[in-house]
Image (cartoon, grey):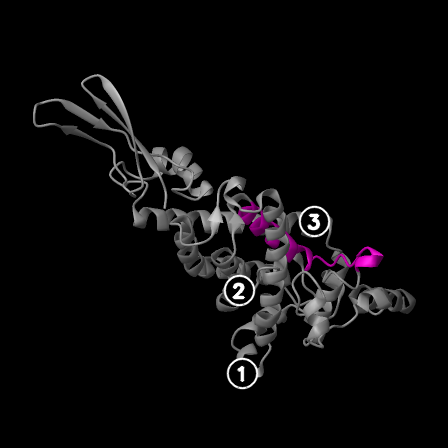
């Protein structure tokens, strides 16, 4: 239950009243004896998601919506969330994807025989289309979250474990989502499901960073669902939640960037780009998102070919050497 503070100005005097009733108001009332009573609407951090609140304050309220559309209106909130979700997702995808493509991705991989014609254009088209359609069910979940139906909280003091709870929640988020995505991803490879949903993503055998979001919308949403579900089951700080969402997008881009370098001790633990490209090439291996744990438990782990001198880079170098000799 939330508390709201109202300031009543009555005949020059100010009275502060705290209420636990969820009331949105901004009005002037005339009393029966002709006195003027002003009620000032509340504003609390818990009333809205921080991003929506900031967007309302600086963009939507002054420049976008008519004054007759209140900030608390469900239709306006849904429309605002939809705009923010699409804009944020596309900016992260195109912005970080472009940086990774320009400065991390090895463009020699585009000479690989399994790199298809106009692949980058196709990856971007599928990704942006998918982001658009995925935003609809995603917004429904965000709407529930900003209305207090999740276990998101604003202040560290609201966690019974304080800062320890915050760091434990990060570890819990990574473990929970990695486990769920492994099984969702693996189920997408079932023969009765694969051809309808996941096959589009595997069109790109030698992926670029722009393949990171190139999914059928249903496939993409189902694989993103654990990120939302976690916040409905376990307490999670709102700032951490938003940060993890950005991190997840960065990670997804990174495992498609063709940079197969992994610190030695972490090769057997982290599911990086070297592991994931083998998933694209060999289909039934390395389903994990961040870690190799569930692939090992599920019998689907494959040591990266790129780290054995048999990866896409090695194949391209061999072809280039053969071409040079032929000349």
Q: CA distance from mark 2 to mark 1?
A: 17 Å
**Crowd band around label 2 with a 10 angstrom C-alpha radius: few (<14), some (14–19), many (20+):** many
The residue at 51%/47% (across/down) is 88
The x and y percentages for residue 75 are 31, 50
Q: Nearer the viewer, residue 171 or 312?
A: 171
Q: Residue furthest left?
A: 33
**The magenta segment:** 240-266
Q: Earlier in the sequence, mark 2 or mark 1?
A: 1
Q: CA distance from mark 3 to mark 2?
A: 25 Å
Query: Left or right: 313 with respect to 240?
Result: right
The x and y percentages for residue 323 are 86, 67
Q: Nearer the viewer, residue 193 or 230?
A: 230
For disc 1, the marked residue is 192
The image quarter containing residue 28 is: top left
Residue 298: within the magenta?
no
The image quarter containing residue 254 is: bottom right
The x and y percentages for residue 24 are 28, 40
For the residue labelled by badge 2, is the local secondary structure a helix, a strand or a loop? Answer: helix
Q: Residue furthest front?
A: 160
260 is higher (above) or lower (below) than 13: below
Q: Nearer the viewer, residue 84 or 201?
A: 84
The x and y percentages for residue 305 are 80, 69
Task: Please indicate, yes or no, whether residue 303 appears anywhere in the rendered image.
Answer: yes
For disc 3, the marked residue is 102
Query: Left or right: 187 with respect to 34?
Result: right
For disc 2, the marked residue is 220
Q: Earlier in the sequence, mark 3 or mark 2?
A: 3
Camera-near label (3 vs 2) is 2
Q: Residue furthest right?
A: 325
């Amino acid at each position: 239950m939330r508390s709201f503070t109202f300031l009543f100005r009555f005949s020059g005097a100010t009275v502060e009243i705290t209420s636990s009733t969820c009331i949105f108001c901004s009005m002037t009332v005339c009393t029966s004896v002709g006195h003027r009573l002003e009620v000032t609407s509340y504003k609390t951090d818990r009333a809205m998601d921080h991003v929506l609140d900031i967007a309302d304050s600086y963009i939507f309220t002054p420049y976008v919506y008519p004054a007759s559309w209140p900030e608390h209106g469900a239709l306006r909130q849904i429309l605002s969330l939809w705009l923010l979700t699409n804009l944020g997702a596309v900016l992260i995808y195109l912005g970080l994807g472009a940086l990774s493509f320009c400065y991390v991705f090895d463009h020699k991989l585009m000479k690989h025989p399994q790199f298809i014609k106009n692949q980058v254009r196709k990856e971007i088209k599928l990704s942006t289309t998918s982001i658009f359609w995925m935003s609809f069910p995603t917004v429904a979940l965000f709407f529930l979250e900003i209305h207090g139906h999740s276990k998101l909280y604003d202040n560290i003091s609201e966690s019974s474990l304080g800062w320890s709870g915050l760091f434990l929640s990060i570890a819990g988020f990574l473990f929970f989502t990695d486990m769920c995505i492994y099984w969702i991803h693996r189920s997408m490879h079932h023969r009765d499901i694969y051809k309808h949903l996941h096959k589009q993503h595997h069109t790109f055998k030698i992926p670029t960073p722009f393949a990171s979001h190139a999914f059928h919308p249903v496939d993409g949403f189902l694989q993103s669902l654990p990120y939302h579900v976690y916040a409905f089951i376990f307490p999670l700080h709102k700032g951490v939640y938003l940060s993890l969402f950005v991190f997840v997008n960065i990670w997804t881009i990174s495992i498609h960037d063709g940079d197969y370098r992994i610190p030695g001790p972490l090769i057997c633990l982290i599911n990086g780009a070297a592991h994931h490209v083998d998933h694209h090439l060999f289909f039934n291996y390395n389903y994990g998102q961040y870690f190799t744990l569930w692939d090992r438990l599920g019998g689907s782990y494959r040591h990266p070919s790129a780290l054995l001198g048999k990866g896409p880079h090695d194949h391209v170098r061999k072809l280039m050497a053969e071409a040079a000799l032929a000349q």
